[in-house]
Image (tube, rainbow, N blue to C red):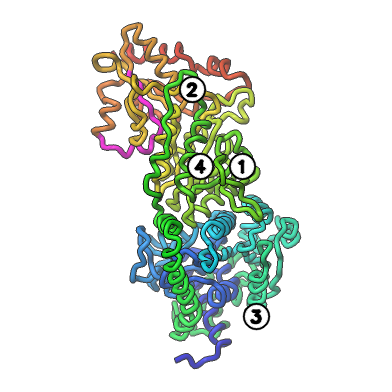
Amino acid sequence: MLTTTALDLDTLSVNTIRGLCMDAVQRAESGHPGTPMGIAPVAYTLWQRFLRFDPADPIWPNRDRFVLSEGHASALLWSLLHLTGVRAVDPDYEVLGRPSVTLEDLKTFRQLDSRAPGHPEYRWTSGVEATTGPLGQGDANSVGMAIAGRWLASRYNRDGFKLFDFDVYSITGDGDLMEGISSEAASLAGHLRLANLCWIYDSNRVTIEGSTDLAFTEDVAERFLAYGWNVTTVADANDLDSVERALHNFKAEHERPTLIVVHSHIGYGSPVEDTAQAHGKPLGSQAVRETKRFFGMPDDVDFYIPDQVSEWFAQGIGARGGAARSAWRSSFAGYRARYPELADEIERMQRRELPDGWQDALPTFPADAKGIATRESSGQVLNALAQAVPWLLGGSADLAPSTGTRLTFAGAGDFQAGQSGRNFHLGIREHAGAAIANGMALTKLRPYWSTFLIFSDYARAAIRLSALMEIPTVHIFSHDSIGVGEDGPTHQPVEQLAALRATPGLLVFRPADANEVVESWRVVAGLRREPAALVLTRQRVPTFDRTRLAAAAGVAKGAYVLADPPSGEPDVILLATGSEVALALAARDELAVDGIGARVVSMPCWELFDRQPRRYRDEVLPPAVRARVAIEQASTLGWERYVGDAGAIVGMHTFGASAPLKQLLSKFGFTPERVTQVAREQVAANT
């Protein structure tokens, strides 16, 4: 039985969180104790009094989302997950019996295999809604989650069935709000009037180097007012009633996103309170003991958890979340009976499955020597696929007409304040655009976003995090090479393709023609735990005659033999991707005149090819054939593992130039004559 007052239990719970955070960091001899200690009362108030979240089922669809954008404060989240008894979920979305974060995990904070790593990691620890740590990313993810919530409500809610009305909370800090991505995301959120979004700004005014006065003196509240946000302030993070009033203010706001500016004290209660020494290193054993005495806690007990605290959380967030989840499940049963098709969509979405027969929507393109740009064929495939998969949606960084990513079929519509269509206008905000798409994917939608390949650099951190989180975000990049032409080297990607391929877990597709585009989308659409990048041409490329060449279905294996010599084993292998596959075919024909047999291998996705059994890889690239030429209008980095030390690469070794395409191809050696010359040299050198 609980015998202390609610006020006492509030204080005891907050201080228990603080104690666990201090002890975890001290035991690890690594971490950030000060931020969790300062913002703990706010996180506690949110979780215990407001958050609609069931620890027994941490993935039920209409739960509120909590994102810790200041991910360096991860000890705060691990303490909350442990104290509230959040259950673990397996990769198949089944709730397990074990806790998400055990006390042993807290004691092994930041150690190998602990469920309490240095920063929150989605899919590693249940209860983590997004991987955070790179500052600002979580904020932008939360915007994507809020967008998803509004879209889900528009599509699926019906009279008497409010299936989706969740709120999204992000605790953000000074560092987050210095990052440009948070400004991009906040600007778009204000434009879209996402009233289901609340950022809690932990203004502790300290970063690693010292006071924020060194570099960050703007009026953040005024900035967010200019973005169109509702802004309220809590003068003291320790004033739980003020925190509660601010959260009620958010709940009462139905027209704008809300920023709650909370003035906190980093390292509250410790000897290094309000200093940089509290930020990124353990307090020290003596300081920990002194701080525990300040909080009225036993200073000789580590990882102290009074029995009343766990029971108190069970009566708060546990009971409230369980009742909300139970009511939702009951409502959904009635919804399924009345709207079976929509219910089926929701259930498939939650399992990351697609509708039956979705592949029937994919087109086939007839042979055409003149051809079509792969950005255009991708747009056609995307529109066909989106009609079969209603939760496939997305947009571009102000480039939809150029990237071919606008959904044009009847009913697709735009997503704006007051509109919930499937075309998103991200504005010229590449970094936030990618992270917002990640947030939508974390909410189980199938999002894509797009820009020119050269501008993938702006979004690198978010692309990387989509791979780290193992979520199926689709990154679409057009204008993939010097084929951009007259725009010149500022817009002609060279090193970007290699950078994407260097990202672990990211599938990078550079299809050669319209039917390889179809097959790339076939693979991409079916992904459940991997992101993909589609790299597409601005210029036309021929649509190959598949009655003469191999079927495009070979894309599924990453690389395949597109064409072989009429008879016998090849003398040389020409490997290429994208627009250069047609060049390889032209060179093959010229080589045949000289009696040189050339095999052409299309390699649209290196990552998939590398996963194939050795036997298949050796069939495509026979070890005995050492004469090899790789052709790609990009950095040559990485091709050496396919051509070997004896092979050659026709690629880019400098930046491009401003000129018409034909002149550029001649200048940089992407001509049949040049490729044929290199192939002859390879044959001679390996004979």
Residue 204: % across, % down = 65, 67
- Helix, strand, or loop for circle 4? strand
- Whole-number angstrom distance, CA of label 1 to CA of label 3: 42 Å
Along the viewing direction, whichever of 644 and 613 lies nearer the viewer: 613
Assess whether mark 3 and mark 1 are in contact (beta carbons under 8 angstroms): no
* Label 3 vs label 2, nearer the camera: 2
Q: Spatial distance from mark 1 to mark 4, Cα to Cα?
A: 11 Å
Q: Is residue 469 left or right of residue 247?
A: left
Question: Position of 164 compared to 419: left or right?
Answer: left
Give the labeled residue for mark 1: 397
Q: Which mark is residue 464?
A: none
Q: In front of the other: label 2 or label 4?
A: 2
Give neighbour class at mark 4: few <14, some 14-19, many 20+ (Cα, 10 Å): many
The numbered mark, 2 or 4, whose residue comes first in the sequence reads 2
Precedes in sequence: disc 2 or disc 1: 2
| Figure quadrant of the N terminus | bottom left
Residue 601: in magenta span: yes
Q: Which residue is depicted at the point 56% across and 30% down?
A: 479
Q: Which mark is residue 241?
A: 3
Image location (x, y in percent) of residue 549:
34, 22
Q: Position of residue 328 (x, y in %)?
A: 47, 70
Range of magenta residues: 599-614
Q: Amino acid at mark 1?
A: Ala
Q: Which of the two discs, 4 and 3, labels the residue nearer the N terminus?
A: 3
| Disc assigned to residue 371 | 2
Marks 2 and 4, how far apart in space? 24 Å
- Mark 2: few, some, or many residues within 10 Å (few <14, many ≥20)? some
50 lies left or right of 526: right
Q: Residues within 10 Å of mark 3 (few under 14, many from 20)?
A: few
Residue type at the position of mark 2: Gly
Q: CA distance from mark 4 to mark 3?
A: 44 Å
Q: Which residue is mark 4?
A: 475
